Image: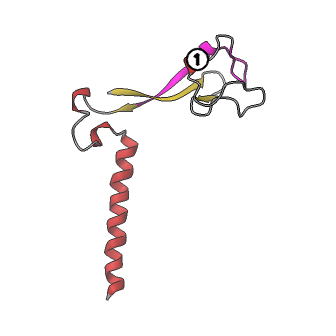
Amino acid sequence: FIKRSTGKHKCTNCDFEYDETKGDSYLIGGMNKPGTTFAELPSNWRCPTCRASKDSFEEVVEEIPGFEVNQGYGLGFNSMTGGQKTGIIFGGLGLFFVLFLSGYAMS
């Protein structure tokens, strides 16, 4: 399986999640602007909730099932996560059901 980074890092002590798209400037005393990657944070940066060091964070990744060589095939469906594929399948079934019921409204 391929692992893809989500741009988030989670504290192993308190489950605080640092999101690179948000930074930490929305927190009281936060100095890092949105778009600041976790690697660009200063080495003395600490978790704003539990004050754990930067080493206590783990990167949040998502798994994409399938072999890496097959990711470019299948109209882009091979590079989707399992949750995304499930959403498309059940969304399509729901749409079919609504269209099927709307046929009764025409008569």
Quadrant of the image occupied by residue 34: top right
Q: Is residue 61 magenta?
A: yes
Q: Quadrant of the N terminus?
A: top left
Between 100 and 39, the one lying in front of the other is 39
- Above or below for 87 versus 22: below
* Image location (x, y in percent) of residue 101: 35, 76
Name the residue: 21% across, 38% down: 73
Residue that extends furthest to the bottom in the rendered view of this protein: 107
Is 31 situated left or right of 65 in this image? right
Q: Position of residue 27 (x, y in %)?
A: 73, 32
Q: Which residues are magenta?
A: 45-62
Residue 58 highlighted magenta (yes or no)? yes
**Residue at the top extreme of this rendering:** 43
Instruction: Give the total number of marks visible in the rendering.
Output: 1
Give the residue at x 37% y 71%.
98
The answer to whether 78 appears left or right of 36 in the picture is left
Quadrant location of residue 107? bottom left
Whether residue 83 is situated above or below residue 64 in the rendered picture? below
x, y percentage for residue 35?
A: 57, 29
Mark 1 secondary-structure assignment: helix
Q: Which residue is mark 1?
A: 40
- The residue that appears at 38% across and 45% down in the rendered structure is 84
The figure's colour scheme reads secondary structure
Query: Residue 31's quadrant in the figure?
Result: top right
Q: Amino acid at mark 1?
A: Glu
x%, y% of residue 80?
34, 40
Local packing at callout 1 (Cα closer than 10 Å; few below 14, some 14-19, many 20+) is few
**Residue shown at the point (36%, 48%) measured from the top left:** 86
